[in-house]
Amino acid sequence: MPRRLTQTKPNTHQTLKNMSFESMVVSWLMYDGWQVFTPILDNGHQTDILISDGPNYFRIQIKTVEASGEDHLVENKWEESNVDYVIYFARNSTWGYIAPAFDNKKRPLNHPEHARFEANSRTQFLKEFHKID
């Protein structure tokens, strides 16, 4: 079995972990039948993935946070963009939240409009994703 014999720089390793969450969401949404598009560059548009059911398109941003609890405050960094949803993963835990774009400057992850899911469960993620407006 292959083994990685080189040291990965800490910032590079964190980027790889963050990208793994994006890949997981892409896989889950494709499994659910969505067309999934990834921008070559999302700088400025702040869109990690674009999904479509055919006639409709939705912009999604995927973020990881170091959360001390589910009431962790997240900042609205997408005010001037057209992001429809932000999917948050807690790096230091096994849960995440799906949030529709919001206007507040900050909001707790466990806000009533957000949907909680277990980060290791495609089924639960999709169930909660279907509930979001």
Image (spheres, grey):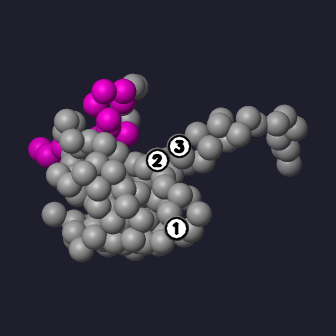
Q: Which quadrant holds residue 37?
A: top left
SS class of the residue under badge 3? helix
Q: Nearer the viewer, residue 29 or 15?
A: 15
**Mark 2–mark 3 CB contact (< 8 Å):** yes
In the rendered structure, which amino acid carries the disc numbered 1? Ser
Q: Which residue is mark 1?
A: 68
- Most common SS among magenta residues: loop
Q: Nearer the viewer, residue 124 or 117?
A: 117
> Which residue is depicted at the point 60% across and 47% down?
17
Residue of label 2: 22
Query: Is residue 83 found left or right of 17 in the rendered image?
Result: left
Calculate the distance from the C-alpha at mark 3 to the C-alpha at mark 1.
22 Å
Query: Quarter of the image holding residue 12?
Result: top right
Amino acid at dot 2:
Glu
Label 3 Cα crowd, 10 Å radius (few <14 / some 14-19 / many 20+): some
- The residue drawn where x is 34% and y is 71% is 110
Residue shown at 50%/63% (left/top)? 67
First reached walking from the N terminus: tag 2 or tag 1: 2
Q: Residue tagged by mark 3?
A: 19
Image quarter (top left, top right, bottom left or bottom right) of the C terminus: bottom left
Label 2 and label 1: CA atoms lie apart by 22 Å
Q: Which residues make up the magenta segment?
A: 42-57
Whether residue 82 is in magenta: the answer is no
